[in-house]
Image (cartoon, rainbow, N blue to C red):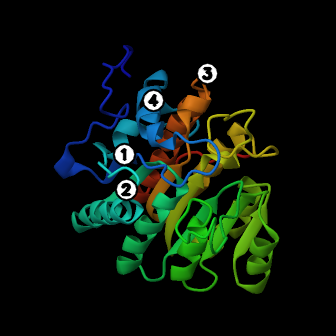
Amino acid sequence: MNGHPPLFRPDRFLGMDAAPGEARWVFFGIPMDFTASYVPGSRFGPDAVRRASYALETYSWRQQRDLSETGAYDAGDLELPFGNVPEALERIRRQARAVLAEGRRWCAVGGEHLVTVPLVEVLLEQYPDLVVVHWDAHADLRDTYLDERFSHATALRRVADRLRPGHLYQFGIRSGTAEEAAYIAARPVHSFPDEVYRPLAAVREQLAGRPVYLTVDLDVIDPAYLPGTGTPEPGGIPAREALEALTLLQGLEVVGMDLVEAAPLADTSQRTAVLAAKMVREALIAVSAAAAGTGGKEGQA
């Protein structure tokens, strides 16, 4: 930060100072929580994460690089018609296609996990061999939830419907139904319970050279560290493991990513939003380090 605090910009994530036409990565918010089943309010996640970024430095001590080097641009939040799920998903698709048409990649912040479905759909148009790396407390592989096929509880089932067999990798899962467990057992879904860093490090070579999409449900982190989420699940990973695991993105061909399910109204301490903002910073630095051909500094959990 050059020794002085940055000017607070409520409409811009800290350090995302690239001009729109020069950006390599586009950051945007998706304020949608139309199918939230427990704690609503993730529509306020993008704004809270953006504001909380000003509690941080642009420089990553862990990776020894600065967010301002990533060429990221904050495009603001999408305008979505409240309660209209099909139209909201279509507007998300239009935004994603516009970013891809410009030769850029995105880091989106939700919003509920259903927003991942249209983002993956658009990427599959360009990358039919796409691999999805999914961090979550919940498998999200139900075929329906309350008789609805499009829900935050079915998001990864709709993603899996579209992917090639064996192209879904799940990490940190510690909750699900018997139906979801049977689905994983019957199909080539790579599912790793409870942890993220060690299993991701173990399969990293399988992901190398393939287009990868990362989707992170913040409830993968234990609610002791991150209480502001829609469906908190005890027994999650610590904050440090999440941050260290993001360094494993270095060297992978990450073509897009999202971070979802921050519900800031459920956390008056704001530590959820601050941790989410730090994860955005670390993820963008890691993937841009790979694109720039720099090594960075990998941590160990």
Is 250 drawn above or below residue 97 in the view shown?
above
| Crowd class of label 4 (few under 14; some 14 to 19; many from 20; radius 10 Å) | many
Residue at x 76% of width, y 65% of height: 192
| Crowd class of label 2 (few under 14; some 14 to 19; many from 20; radius 10 Å) | many
| Mark 2 element type | strand
- Nearer the observer: mark 1 or 2; the answer is 2
| Mark 1 element type | helix
Amino acid, disc 2: Trp
Residue at x 36% of width, y 79% of height: 125
Q: Give the distance between the C-alpha atoms of the residues marked 2 and 4, in whole angstroms.
A: 18 Å
Q: Where does residue 91 sit, x and y in percent of width and height?
A: 30, 61
- Nearer the observer: mark 1 or 4; the answer is 4
- Nearer the observer: mark 3 or 4; the answer is 3
Q: Give the distance between the C-alpha atoms of the residues marked 1 and 2, in whole angstroms.
A: 12 Å
Residue at x 32% of width, y 51% of height: 80
Residue closest to the eye, 232 or 210:
232
The circle drawn on residue 269 is 3
Is 83 drawn above or below residue 18 in the view shown?
below
Q: Is residue 250 visible?
A: no
Query: What residue is disc 2 on?
Result: 106
Q: Earlier in the sequence, mark 3 or mark 1?
A: 1
Query: What residue is disc 4 on?
Result: 53
Q: Give the distance between the C-alpha atoms of the residues marked 3 and 1, in whole angstroms.
A: 29 Å
Q: Earlier in the sequence, mark 2 or mark 4?
A: 4
Q: Where does residue 255 sit, x and y in percent of width and height?
A: 42, 65
Query: What residue is disc 1 on?
Result: 70
Q: Earlier in the sequence, mark 1 or mark 2?
A: 1
| Crowd class of label 1 (few under 14; some 14 to 19; many from 20; radius 10 Å) | many
Amino acid, disc 3: Ser
Q: Is residue 81 left or right of residue 187?
A: left
